[in-house]
Image: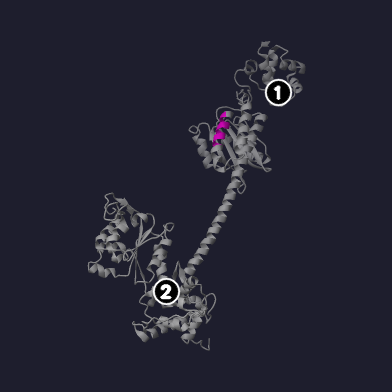
Amino acid sequence: MQNMNLTKLSDRIKFIRESQKISKKEFARRLEISAAYISELESGQKTTISGLLAKMIQYEFAINREWLLEGKGTPFIIESNNAGQIVKTEDTSVNNLSKFESLLSEISATYINLPIEKLDSALTRDFTHLNKLLGVDLCILYTRKTEADRFYPTQYFAEDPVSMAFILNWLKNNPGISEKTYPYVFAKWNRGEPTQLLTNKGLKAMDKEIQTLQMLGVKSALSIPIRFSGSVVGALNVSIMQRYQTWPEDMISRLRLFGEVFINAIMRKEAEEKLQKALSEIKKLKERFEADYLYLSEEIKDEYNFEGIVGKSEALKKILVKVKQVGPTDATVLILGETGTGKGLIARAIHDSSSRSNRPLIQVNCAALAPTLIESELFGHEKGSFTGATTRRLGRFETAKGTTLFLDEIGDLPLELQAKLLRVLEEGEFERVGGNSTIHTDIRLIAATSRNLEEDVKEGRFRSDLWYRLNIFPIFVPPLRERIDDIPLLIEHFVEKYQKWARKKFKSIPLKTINAFNDYDWPGNIRELSNIVERAVITSHDGTLKLEIPLSYKKSSYGGEDLKYIIENIEREKILKALQESNWVIKGKNGAAQRLGYTPSTLRYRVSKLEIRRPESS
């Protein structure tokens, strides 16, 4: 007979019976001892237990006798190997059931409102806790990818990543589990049944699974399928490297709850990610639509109005092509052309198409400032650096840091400042007037001039090194007399602009006047045309705009009537060719108007004016 603490003995017997999920009567029957005796033992009425009873409990329920009688060691001594030897195993659930319940409750509460961006770190943390509580070497959570009908490891934790590097590397190279690779486990997963695998024994059906576990050095493995919305969507796997062990049903049911919490969180994350992906796709479609809209708008601008640039002439199109080429870069641009041709609009178009367009374009007109003030305007000055400098002032090069600086009429920049400007362009640094500290800046420079800088360089009025530094990407803006096709569109543009300001509405413009404008020399270019239209809007009253031909009107000095005749013949041949190619169709897709870049009404007018007739055979 064995004496012991009967209270503890009672707890141990209750644990054995409850872990096997059998009644007191069945427990007693299997031990061939009366139920009354067992009840007396559990209640503490009996003070001794026979060695026979202890031995029967040991063999019937694979219980460690020392644990039963003295509370030493581990409870279960289950499983025998192929040689018939008893293999000691541990069931870490014995003293940890309350800890499992506590951890499960804590994890369940954590994942209810957990933001998806924190899910991965939470899974890593909780897998660590679960792994340590189980006393196993590796925990893996598999999730099912429906499209491939395979299970892939979503989360795993290794107790000792260094010693288990071989397994972790194998997982990366063999991520998926399918019916073909592991038919036994896969079939049980599909049925929702847990699988316990011991590499010292197994059925023939388990051959592939056992061989893989043996190759990886795993002795015991448990795999529990997890359901979500009625389907098996994942599995929780635990592996032990050092011992053979099986898990009782109550532990499996608890682990299944852990898996369900994890899988539910992952499914919620995937659902939110799909939603975010769908929203991202919608955003991309929206951006694509906006891009297409912007592209179409740009196409319209190319023909009529590119950020205030109006026209459809070939000369203007070539300029806009250059704008699109150089705009996205940080290259220095030099815009050349007569006064009033719209060089400032070209500079703005370049800035608007650059990566610096989120900042405003900073402009300085070098011709509008006195030579004594230009240096201060560009580079700034320190307090007291000259008479009237009562405070420190930042120059335009500091203000324009990170954006574009447009220096108009750079040909008027004094020689002594040209060297300082060259230094800024070459080294990105300068000093304020009256200052000693070097200031660094980051600007994209666009310069413009109506002067012939090459002649100025030859005559010593402009530094040759600065000229070469500015002349990286020159753009020549032609005068209005070389953009005759743009005059009608420019008139319409300025009428629209000024009639709003004057609160008037004009329905028509005399074609005779527009035609006469084509022969005018336009020394003031677009600025002069703008002034004429503005004056006409002010003086006209009856809805018909009365444009006055300038007093300095004269026939073109570039060939007179002969040049006009040549131009008309060239235009006639171009229109005739387009009409023949379109089978004399003016309007619509691939019509002559589209080929020429004219509106149908404009083309009909030019056909009539040039007296183009369709051959009868056509």
Q: Residue at x 68, y 40 (%)?
A: 191
In the image, is residue 126 part of the stretch drawn in magenta? yes
Query: x, y (%) of residue 26?
Result: 75, 23
Q: Which residues are magenta?
A: 123-132
Q: Residues within 10 Å of mark 1 (few under 14, many from 20)?
A: some
Q: Which residue is mark 1?
A: 17
Q: Please tell me the numbered disc located at residue 102.
A: none
Residue 54 seen: yes
Q: 157 or 549, which is in the foreground? A: 549
Query: x, y (%) of residue 131?
Result: 57, 31
Q: CA distance from mark 2 to mark 1?
A: 102 Å
Note whether 185 is above or below 452 in the view shown: above
- Kind of residue indicated by mark 2: Ser
Q: Which residue is mark 2?
A: 530
Q: Quadrant of the N terminus?
A: top right
Secondary structure of the residue carrying numbered label 1: helix
Q: Residue at x 41, y 72 (%)?
A: 316
